[in-house]
């Protein structure tokens, strides 16, 4: 499809913003954790359960997303995703009961993954040839971070006008719904039909056979090992460092939310650009991952030992956020070193996503129970300390996975084993 550069960049901006807001809204607890708990009148455990509903539906929808992207029109799926997310968010803004919130977050999982994730990847790939894919996906990640930052800070500013946390949280949700409505119109009128005139992909039977073969490959499981460690660290830091600052360091909810925006969104852009450059400087990706996991473990432990020095501890949480975002933005770059053939990238990433991103449905319930245990003992800090130990353990497992990756890389390049 011939597109001039201006139109192509405009389309990239639109679908990247959709990507950002499609995850900002379901994961709004990352930024407004304490306000969300107060507005919805729920406990940490209930919020963890609600979060797991989104995580479960998200994880099980990765493979169906690929199937839908191949069977149905890409542009129509993007329109369905935006429109559905708008309607779901309007329902969410009326602050329904616990079970309705479970349904809402399950629907978020369906329409942010099943009808969106693979169509988004397909749309970006269609914007340029193979020589441009790295730049296109890198720029898209940067735009996503900028869009999330802008919307999150705007929501934070609007919430400041409300003395009542309930009304403030409702306003934030209505803002997100309006953004989805605008994006729906932009996709309808400005995003081209990528599938027009294209041939049908490989037959379903062939894809099924390839899927089972990839599931049995050691390269697939090595990638899963590395990615699951990095993703658990990222998920924990993004979900709970904000409320840690509020409930342990005694920072105001507003300041904590501002720091969460920085950790969750601004650092996404910085880590994505600099992390890729740094990782490529290592001869083996496994070496770079080793140092990233090691530094993450050290920073996680440092949070525990600097909690009495509030400013120092806050700085450490920001550095920790940078490190886990470096891991998240670069762990898909390990496929070649792990031994995944280029021609099997699509099938491999579908299987890896299904398993390696499964922490979406168990991290929140586990951490929320750590916090509930601490509160039952009269000191929530105990629960947060358990969370920090959890991060140190996963950092250690990440180090092991990185060493396995480096060994695989050396083996593939015919070098001596270490």
Image (cartoon, helix red, strand yellow):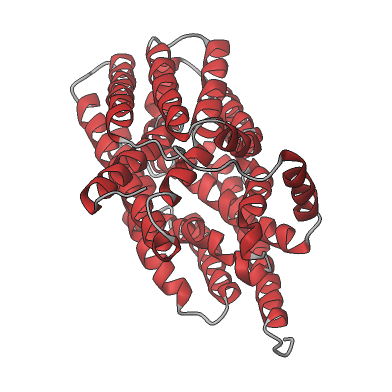
Residue at (75%, 54%) from the top-left corner? 214
Front-most of 225 and 140? 140
Q: Which of the 4 quarters of the picture holds residue 408?
A: bottom right
Q: Which of the 4 quarters of the picture holds residue 84?
A: top left
Residue at (45%, 33%) from the top-left corner? 27
Front-most of 45 and 103? 103
Left or right: where 278 falls relative to 206: left
Residue at (40%, 15%) from the top-left corner? 87
Picture coordinates of residue 70 (x, y %)?
A: 58, 38
Picture coordinates of residue 40 (x, y %)?
A: 44, 16
- Asked whether residue 72 is in view, the answer is yes
Picture coordinates of residue 136 (x, y %)?
A: 37, 56
Which residue occupies the extreme bottom position in the image?
416
Residue at (31%, 55%) from the top-left corner? 311
Residue 192 vertical position relative to residue 325 in the rendered view, above or below: above
Front-most of 254 and 153? 153
Number of on-image labels: 0
Which residue occupies the extreme left position in the image?
161
Picture coordinates of residue 134 (x, y %)?
A: 42, 62
Residue 166 vertical position relative to residue 397 in the rendered view, above or below: above
Q: Which of the 4 quarters of the picture holds residue 321?
A: bottom left
- Asked whether residue 370 is in view, the answer is no
Left or right: where 189 falls relative to 136: left
For the C terminus, the image quarter is bottom right
């Amino acid at each position: 499809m011939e597109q001039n550069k201006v139109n192509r960049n405009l389309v990239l901006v639109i679908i990247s913003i959709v990507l950002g807001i499609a995850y900002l809204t379901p994961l709004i607890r990352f930024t407004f954790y304490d306000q969300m708990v107060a507005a919805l009148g729920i406990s940490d455990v209930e919020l963890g359960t609600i979060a797991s509903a989104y995580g479960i539906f998200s994880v099980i929808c990765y493979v169906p997303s690929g199937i839908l992207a191949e069977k149905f029109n890409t542009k129509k799926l993007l329109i369905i995703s935006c429109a559905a997310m708008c309607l779901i968010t309007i329902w969410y803004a009326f602050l329904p009961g616990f079970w309705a919130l479970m349904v809402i977050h399950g629907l978020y999982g369906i329409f942010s993954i099943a009808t969106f994730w693979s169509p988004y990847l397909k749309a970006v790939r269609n914007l340029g040839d193979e020589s441009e894919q790295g730049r296109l996906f890198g720029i898209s990640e940067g735009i996503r971070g900028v869009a999330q930052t802008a919307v999150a800070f705007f929501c934070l500013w609007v919430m400041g006008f409300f003395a009542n946390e309930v009304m403030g949280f409702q306003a934030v949700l209505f803002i997100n719904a309006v953004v989805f409505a605008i994006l729906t119109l932009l996709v309808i009128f400005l995003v081209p039909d990528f599938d027009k005139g294209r041939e049908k992909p490989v037959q379903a039977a062939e894809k099924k056979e390839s899927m089972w073969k990839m599931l049995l490959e050691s390269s697939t499981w090595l990638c899963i090992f590395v990615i699951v460690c990095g993703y658990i660290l990222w998920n924990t830091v993004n979900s709970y460092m904000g409320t840690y600052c509020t409930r342990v360091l005694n920072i105001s909810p507003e300041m904590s939310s501002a720091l969460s925006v920085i950790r969750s969104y601004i650092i996404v852009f910085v880590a994505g650009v600099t992390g890729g450059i740094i990782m490529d400087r290592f001869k083996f990706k496994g070496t770079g991952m080793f140092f990233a996991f090691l530094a993450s473990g050290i920073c996680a432990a440092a949070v525990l030992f600097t909690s009495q020095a509030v400013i120092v501890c806050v700085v450490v949480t920001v550095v920790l956020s940078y490190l886990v975002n470096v891991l998240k933005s670069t762990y898909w770059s390990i496929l070649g070193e792990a031994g995944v053939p280029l021609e099997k990238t699509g099938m491999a990433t579908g299987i890896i996503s299904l398993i390696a991103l499964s922490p979406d449905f168990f991290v929140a319930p586990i951490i929320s129970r750590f916090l509930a245990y601490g509160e039952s003992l009269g000191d929530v800090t105990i629960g947060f300390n358990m969370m920090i130990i959890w991060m140190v353990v996963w950092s250690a497992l990440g180090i092991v996975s990185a060493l396995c990756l480096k060994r695989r890389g050396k083996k593939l390049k015919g070098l001596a084993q270490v």
